[in-house]
Amino acid sequence: MSKKRILVVEDEQELIKAVQIRLKYSGYEVLSACNGREGLEVARKEKPDLILLDMMMPEMDGLTMLSRLKNSSDIKHIPVIMLTAKAQSDDIAQASKLGAFDYVVKPFTSQILLEKIRKAIS
Amino acid sequence: MKFLEEYEKIRTFFKGVVSEPTDRKFDLSVLGEIAKAISYTSEHQLLLKLIMSELSKIIEYDLCAALFFESDTVNIIFKPLNLQALNYKHVIRKSLVESASLLTGEDIQEKEIKEILIPFDENNCGTVQKGCEELRSFFNVPFSMYGRIVGMINLASCKNNAFSEGDVKGIYTIINQTSNAIGRLQKAVTAEKTRMESMVKSIPEGVIMLDQKDEVVVFNPQARMMLGFGLNISVTSKVLNEKLRLFGLDKMFKESHREMRSIVREINIVQKNKSVVFRSSISPVKDIEGKIIGIVAILRDITREKEMDRMKTEFISIVSHELRTPLTTMKEFTAIIADEIPGKLTEGQREYVNIIQGNIDRLARLIGNLLNISKIESGTTELKKELVDVVKIVESVVLTLRPGINEKKINLRIVPYSPQIAIYADSDSVFQIFTNLINNAIKFTPDSGEIIVKMVDKHKEVEFIVKDTGIGIASESIDKVFDRFQQFGRTTGSGEKGTGLGLAITKELIKEHQGKIWVKSELEEGTKFYFLLPKYDPKSLLKSLLKECICSGEDKASGQLTKVSLVKMSLVDPERLRQELSGGLLDSALRGMEDVLRDSLRSSEEGDTVINVSMGSVVVLADCDKQGMLKVKKRLNSALDSYLVRRKLSDKIEFYFDCLTYPDDVQSAEDMISKVDIS
């Protein structure tokens, strides 16, 4: 069975690196993009199994990318887990309305992140 | 104090007059009367009238007249002691006007002359003169104030040589000293008034004072600016009152008057396209006897304070978010090292990484709490108040804190007065309140200690007590426990370190629920935190909700009556259902139906609430008239139908609706509640 591929869309390069190390160690293949616009491009080209999507990013934010993704028939099936620094905010409600699978509040622990990833692509 | 001094001077003077032998006629009682009058009025006209009638007691005259200047008019008061005397009114008038013109150098004839006649009492007209055919004697005495002639008094009689020189001299003295006294009083009053006015002018707050008839008494420049009047525009009472109405201040004035107490409120107004916030304190003004004689409003512009407050909250919130991002990266890399992904750790490295992780988590909690408190303060926390079982919440809190409790071998007991206790609250907040308090108790209780969470039925509220056998709080610190960043004592054991915000948040959350919290503690003995939360009582909840809807509607200046509708859903034949369905199934169906009602309310607009009552639910629709209510009812009906079909209960459970609309069907909130059967 081939490795599951996860796309991390996040503007903090160092955080991408940390998540990358953790996910690779846990047996996933990792792709990355640093804003929503780039994230959509990579998603269309690579069709990953899951997307980790940051809310606040320059150029195109997470919610905009999410709504575009869910409106594109070729990639709308990909589950999305939102990464957010705002717990219990309207953004989370908005994201779940738009069709996000789940969310993780920063700063998160690897266990929680991995658990949610497993749930999303089981 | 000024007035008392003046009064004393007058008294001394009158005593002097009486002691002179020529003036023996002027007995003390007359002078006393005049002196007394001066102490409460400084109006010339009133005093003159009084002097004229007092004089009739000591000097025989037929007609007394007094001319005095009042701004641009000339007044002449006549006091006849018999009917015939009135025939000579015009003669006296002519004499007074001529003399006064001569003395002042002004042509008084040219001016408007107002005559004031004091009618005489026929039964008690003193010395009645019979056959008063002509005036045989009269004299004029001028009186002055600060050396300026302000009037003239005349006494006339039908008798020959009716008046002695002493009479003339006495009257001259009385009238002039009275005038001087009035002058001094007026000056004192004016000085007092000027002092008050300049004080009121110089304070930064806007001051408005109205008397009982809504006439303006005080209206300082600051108040003018605040209410949007220019400094040079004259503002009549009518215009000011209209403005007050516009800003909703008139209602506060009335409330303050009615309840005889001060009211402090913030009002938002838009002025020149700018939103302005005033804190207005409105108080009744009382006289010495406690009678309300007016209302005073102090307005303070707190727009800037509000803005600073908002900026502070926003700042905290932004900073907290910005802090979380680097923290996430730190946390993740530390976890990678701790998990030995890059390579094995030595014993020492493992210890240090653990310390770093502990501190990252502490920083994360601190940021979380800062965010929480700024959110509560800015009023952006939305409490989703609903029926919650507080016993269940406490149990789940204890479950999450179980590791710490077990580690310290603490004996924790929950002592509820009933297996289920319903309160009306936001469950997340209640969870947080108990987490903070129990967590604190664990932290400060030594190993093998005891923590008791007790619940006491207090009629309309539930009292909660979180008691520990910990180290206690020193009495000098007890007042500060709810302040921010106040940490007392050292935590025992290894548990996580506090952020100094837990109790501050707890207090705010309890306050948001109209509850209160207090603490009792004994060093080395332990601490007891007490707090109250409102019980879930469908009837009083419904009452307060309805009252709120109805009152907030009436506040709107539109003058239109607000409409509130109420839909009650009940199950058909609940007794049979109880027998046919298992308790669990019936309960879960009821809760499910309630959720359906909640979900299908008009986009959950503000004020719409679902209250569950036994065997049914009541839906309060704020600002909803009969027509709107019927539409909502239809929607609720079909939503419930499809829910029951989905749960395969449609053949067992039937329901019906009762509907009421205020003010169509009922007169008041109480009326509405009495018509809805809530048990």
Image (tube, coloured by chain):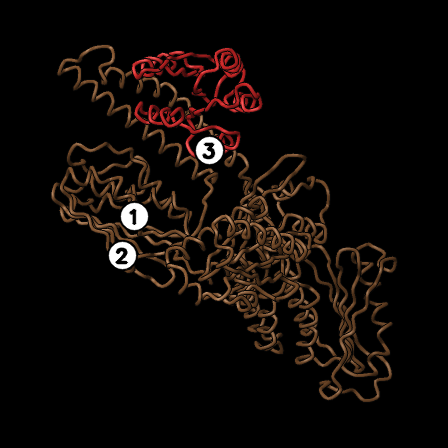
Chain colours: A red, B brown
Badge 2 element = loop
Q: Position of residue B327 (x, y in %)?
A: 34, 21
**Distance CA(mark 3)–CA(mark 2):** 34 Å
To the question of a shared chain for discs 3 and 1, the answer is: no
- Residue at position x 47%, y 63% from top? B539
Query: In the picture provided, is A62 more to the left or to the right than B239?
Result: left
Q: Are marks 2 and 1 in contact (CB under 8 Å)?
A: yes
Query: In the picture provided, is B77 more to the left or to the right than B654?
Result: right
Q: Amino acid at mark 2?
A: Pro
Q: In terms of depth relative to the viewer, which is nearer, A10 or B357?
A: A10
Query: In the picture provided, is B124 more to the left or to the right than B455?
Result: right
Look at mark 1 in the image and give the residue it sits on.
Answer: B394
To the question of a shared chain for discs 3 and 2, the answer is: no
Q: In terms of depth relative to the viewer, which is nearer, A88 or B514?
A: A88
Q: Are marks 3 and 1 in contact (CB under 8 Å)?
A: no
Q: Amino acid at mark 1?
A: Val
- Residue at position x 46%, y 24% from top? A79
**Circle 1 marks a residue in which chain?**
B
Residue B12 visible to an observer of this rendering: no
Badge 3 element = loop
- Residue at position x 44%, y 66% from top? B576
Q: In terms of depth relative to the viewer, which is nearer, B120 or B150?
A: B120
Mark carried by residue B416: 2
**Distance CA(mark 2)–CA(mark 1):** 10 Å
